[in-house]
Image (tube, rainbow, N blue to C red):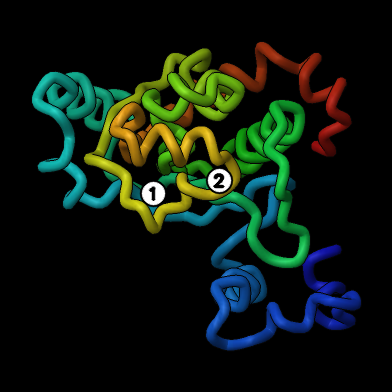
């Protein structure tokens, strides 16, 4: 409701988001068309894992990843695929508390949509290599793995992906070759996220997530 209200009566300083050349306009378009759904610090879209990622997976991770997709996720789609919120209410500071709020909302929404096979997130922010140099971001993967989920790398991250912004030390390490970010992917199945929800009702209550 806050998102749609902000589109109808834009707050001061937000009109540039309506520039058709801005990515924020694409995001707002998807939200209005019910193709993207706000969940706090993250939004989600219904999508899946592109098969084009398979050749990019390291051989040491291929068997475990293929098994997990086929036996636990039961296919390549449809999944909830989270993205950082990027329209009017974009969050510039990532915190574990806000992430957990979004994760709870994913779980509650998965529960109401029986066709959804799981949740999958992927970016340089989810990369184990990123977490090696920026350990404060590990919470973006931790909860998926606590569910019994799976992590894999889908090739190297590109400079345009955003890892050079926000942390000058990390950018310096990349330029010196000390940091080589991958496109990290983490996923958990429908059964796993619903089990997590049932076993963490205290988290839902503490965060005041509306059910």
* Viewer-nearest residue: 164 or 105: 164
Which of the 4 image quarters holds residue 59?
top left
Residue 153 % position (x, y): 27, 32
- The mark that comes first in sequence, 2 or 1, is 1
- Kindly identify which numbered label has been placed on residue 113: 2
The secondary element bearing badge 1 is classed as loop
Secondary structure of residue under mark 2: loop
Instruction: For marks 2 and 1, give the one nearer the viewer.
Output: 1
Q: Which residue is mark 1?
A: 78
Query: Which of the two residues, 22 or 8, is positioned nearer the viewer here?
Result: 22
Q: Work out whether residue 187 can be spotted.
A: no
* 98 left or right, relative to 172: right
Query: Which residue sits at x=58%, y=62%?
Result: 36
The residue lying at 35 percent from left, 41 percent from top is 175
Up the image or down, 9 lies above or below 28; here it is below
Badge 2: residue crowd in 10 Å (few <14, some 14–19, many ≥20): few
* Residue at point 54%, 49% (across, down): 165
Above/below status of 173 relative to 47? above
Give coordinates of residue 80: x percent, y percent.
Answer: 49, 46
Q: Is residue 76 left or right of residue 2?
A: left
Q: Give residue 201's mark.
A: none
Which quadrant of the figure contains the N terminus? bottom right
């Amino acid at each position: 409701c806050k998102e749609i209200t902000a589109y109808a009566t834009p707050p001061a300083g937000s009109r540039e988001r309506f520039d058709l050349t801005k990515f924020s306009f694409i995001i707002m378009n998807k939200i209005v068309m019910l193709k993207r759904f706000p969940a706090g610090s993250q939004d989600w879209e219904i999508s899946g894992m592109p098969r084009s990622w398979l050749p990019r997976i390291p051989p040491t991770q291929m068997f475990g990843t293929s098994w997990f997709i086929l036996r636990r996720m039961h296919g390549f789609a449809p999944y909830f695929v989270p993205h950082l919120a990027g329209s009017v209410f974009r969050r510039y500071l990532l915190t574990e508390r806000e992430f957990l709020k979004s994760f709870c909302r994913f779980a509650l929404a998965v529960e109401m949509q029986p066709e959804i096979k799981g949740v999958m997130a992927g970016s340089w922010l989810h990369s184990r290599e990123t977490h090696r140099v920026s350990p404060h971001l590990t919470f973006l993967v931790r909860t998926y793995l606590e569910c019994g989920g799976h992590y894999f790398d889908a090739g190297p991250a590109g400079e345009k992906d955003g890892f050079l912004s926000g942390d000058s030390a990390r950018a310096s390490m990349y330029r010196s070759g000390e940091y080589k970010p991958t496109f990290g992917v983490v996923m958990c199945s429908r059964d796993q996220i619903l089990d997590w929800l049932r076993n963490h009702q205290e988290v839902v209550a503490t965060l005041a997530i509306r059910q």
